[in-house]
């Protein structure tokens, strides 16, 4: 397999669509994996994509629909009737079907569900639509292989044959009592090695990890990662097995979280991509620039407040960018380490011990930089001894201060329920900029005695 | 299950260790998942951890060893003899065993391998040790369920019973010919539904994704995510099946990559944690601060180069922090979007189109900010009309420039084989700072005509 998509192929498919050569299109696409077809649709226009998706069998296209970008999917689905959409959903696992149906406009949703022929499937989707997006219920699928503890191995295999039809991949075989309460799981190994007349109650493993249907997605991800699970059963308040979450959904969730953290650190508030429109890009980026601007105006106020410096020691002003850049960089470094520590709960020891260590690191970094700046400022920029000393001492002080602030802010945000990743964004750079410049001038004022 | 670790439990275990109450320790720990025991060791000291790991059965401790942090593992293993280490490795899958053995000192490695009793297991580990860490060979395990196309379903089930003993989780059943060449896979569904006398060659699925043993880890992750695979077979140059990679290893790999990107964006060069020592922290952080310092000195040179400004228009200097902060923020935003686009290959369209869109966004953001700054500078900081105009126009120019630079640098780095995530770090902030200040003064010089 593993065909890589060539630009020629896309061009060829586009031509075949223009000429309505259906058989040839089907023949070409049958060689491709559904993820590759999804990638191809990304390069074609909406009409061409619609044409392909209506032409191919819904067994294939349902998989393609799951893979394509949600913005593109929305546009394409506008060309599909409720019954056509229902036909696609019919082929999907309930979790994927639910994700797609909730993207549709409210008035179409009910119409689509009415057109789903498999009543049980429709009911399952309706149930899943009731859960919050970022909860276990919102992530789970209803498809699973479930056997009763009272069955024999032979009956179990018979029932599994039937159930396996609906389940794409068998991760685990779950064991319940007659009321559906989760009792444990059955390993494939045990099923293969036990004799046909053995009862399931004799061979199943009663230790099984599970999550509540209301658990937060983050908690589910933490548990599945910690215990290296590839699927986890979901139970309701009565401990009845209601669904299962597979690791691929968790991977997507983790990836989204990582992207969000990275974007917050870069000062972007919502998920934007390079080809998003002007309005969306501006909305995501302008707020952070405004924060930076406010900081800049704050710095301007501070500088003009120290009038003596502007008139008597103008040379100190040329080092403002140095102080500012260093304060910002140190602050971001410190908070990034804490944000990651909070994220993978690897922070140990006491706050005070950490602050002392952070201060020690800052002192070493600060003195190293200050020595260089001391020499460069005096011999290249001809500042006086006292001026150079002010710059050097200020640099050390600013670095220590920025490190401590950078260390504390993520905790503060975390305790207020705000994503601490915000701290590594323009927010902390800006406050450290302003604080740094103020410290710089204060120290200069003290040393130069004005 | 899902017991959460209470501080009291840890204290209790520590006391039991002090009193050498082995039976009580074993009784308490038997209730815990191995990942929880690993977490507990994190809180105990090395001697206590060693005591527990030597006390418990290697069936449990081998799992614990896999879970604990590698720094801690190294320290604990110093208290283990080669034959004790071999006993632990004996219980592990070959990929985990290989990871742990390569962490040991070179001279102990051979000694440990000699003590592994299962010769086949030892040979498998030796083979895996030969592959590069970040290749498919370095990620794969030798444990897999493999059947021959010439077998009947009955023989297949019999052989699987035997093989399943060694394989923790059966992801897929791979089908090979007599020479071991990968031919396809067998679904559990087909195995359950086919009659006992059917030949595997009649029921197996010939379409199977695979990777070469020399494929890069990043490529493996891309394929497994794209095609939603939970395991992928690995083949050598002759297409012979040599191992399989499971999704949990890929999750760890992706998480590490995301952390690395985030750290690069924050200006940290190696994987540091909040409780790492002074030397490691300084080594990871000082280089980036030096870059920032060089930028600061560059800015100082530029400012002192425009001497007229310092003497005649000192008010322009108070807006340097504003210009600098904005240039840095815009640059980081632009490059972060490109870095993410490169990472998930979602960048489409032509370079020129993207630059034009980016310029348009910059223009809107720039004009919005400039209008505010224009008014504030004139009415609050009492700059002249021409001075305010210089600041406003410079702000727009700086934002556009920073956006374009931020957009291009990731591509440049990527084409040179450097991780583009470096771009969102202090590197781009610094160059944009300097460029921004220069542009600011150049525009002021032109408008004010000195």
Image (spheres, coloured by chain):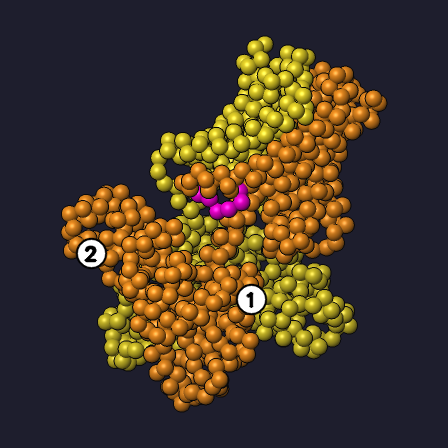
Chain colours: A yellow, B orange
Q: Is residue B132 left or right of residue B445?
A: left
Callout 1: SS:
loop
Residue A43 placement (x, y as % from top left): 70, 61
- Is-magenta flag for residue A308? no
Q: Is residue A50 above or below residue B422?
A: below
Q: Residue at x 40, y 68 (%)?
A: B125
Magenta stretch, residue numbers: B268-273
Image mark for residue B215: 1
Quadrant containing the C terminus of chain B is: top right
* B28 sits left or right of A188 in the view: left
- Residue B153 is drawn in which quadrant? bottom left
* Disc assigned to residue B26: 2
User: Residue A311: image x %, image y %?
Assistant: 68, 12
Q: Nearer the viewer, mark 1 or mark 2?
A: 1
Look at the image and tell me in which quarter the N terminus of chain B lies: bottom left
Quarter location, residue A38? bottom right
Say whether mark 2 and mark 1 are on the same chain. Answer: yes
* Residue B4 visible: no
């Amino acid at each position: 397999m593993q065909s890589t998509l060539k630009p020629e192929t896309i061009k060829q498919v586009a031509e075949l669509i223009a000429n309505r050569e259906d058989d040839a299109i089907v023949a070409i696409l049958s060689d491709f994996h559904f993820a590759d077809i999804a990638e191809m649709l990304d390069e074609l226009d909406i009409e061409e994509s619609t044409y392909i998706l209506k032409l191919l069998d819904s067994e294939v296209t349902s998989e393609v629909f799951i893979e394509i970008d949600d913005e593109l999917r929305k546009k394409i689905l506008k060309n599909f009737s409720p019954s056509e959409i229902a036909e696609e959903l019919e082929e999907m696992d309930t979790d994927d079907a639910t994700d797609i149906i909730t993207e549709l406009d409210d008035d179409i949703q009910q119409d689509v569900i009415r057109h789903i022929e498999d009543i049980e499937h429709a009911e399952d989707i309706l149930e899943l639509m009731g859960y919050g997006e970022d909860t276990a219920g919102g992530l789970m699928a209803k498809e699973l292989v479930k056997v009763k503890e009272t069955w024999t191995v032979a009956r179990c295999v018979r029932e599994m044959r039937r159930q396996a039809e609906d389940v794409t991949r068998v991760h685990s075989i779950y064991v319940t009592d007659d009321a559906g309460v989760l009792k444990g799981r059955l390993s494939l190994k045990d099923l293969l090695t036990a004799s046909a007349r053995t009862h399931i109650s004799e061979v199943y493993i009663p230790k099984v990890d599970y999550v509540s249907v209301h658990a937060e997605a983050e908690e589910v991800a933490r548990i599945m990662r910690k215990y290296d699970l590839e699927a986890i059963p979901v139970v309701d308040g009565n401990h009845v097995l209601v669904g299962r979450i597979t690791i691929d959904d968790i991977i997507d969730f983790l990836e989204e979280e990582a992207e969000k953290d990275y974007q917050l650190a870069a000062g972007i508030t919502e998920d934007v991509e390079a080809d998003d429109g002007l309005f969306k890009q501006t909305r995501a980026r302008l707020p952070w620039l405004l924060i930076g601007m406010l900081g800049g105006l704050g710095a301007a106020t501070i500088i003009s407040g120290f009038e003596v410096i502007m008139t008597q020691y103008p040379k100190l002003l040329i080092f403002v960018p140095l102080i500012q850049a260093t304060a910002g960089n140190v602050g971001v470094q410190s908070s990034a380490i804490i944000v990651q520590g909070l994220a993978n709960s690897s922070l140990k020891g006491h706050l005070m011990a950490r602050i002392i260590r952070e201060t020690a690191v800052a002192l070493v970094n600060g003195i190293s930089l200050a020595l260089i700046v001391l020499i460069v400022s005096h011999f290249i920029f001809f500042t006086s001894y006292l001026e150079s000393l002010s710059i050097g001492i200020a640099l050390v002080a600013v670095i220590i201060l920025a490190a401590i602030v950078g260390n504390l802010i993520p905790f503060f945000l975390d305790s207020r329920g705000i994503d601490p990743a915000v701290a590594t964004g323009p927010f902390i750079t800006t406050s450290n900029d302003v604080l740094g410049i103020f410290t710089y001038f204060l120290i200069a004022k003290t040393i130069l005695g004005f």
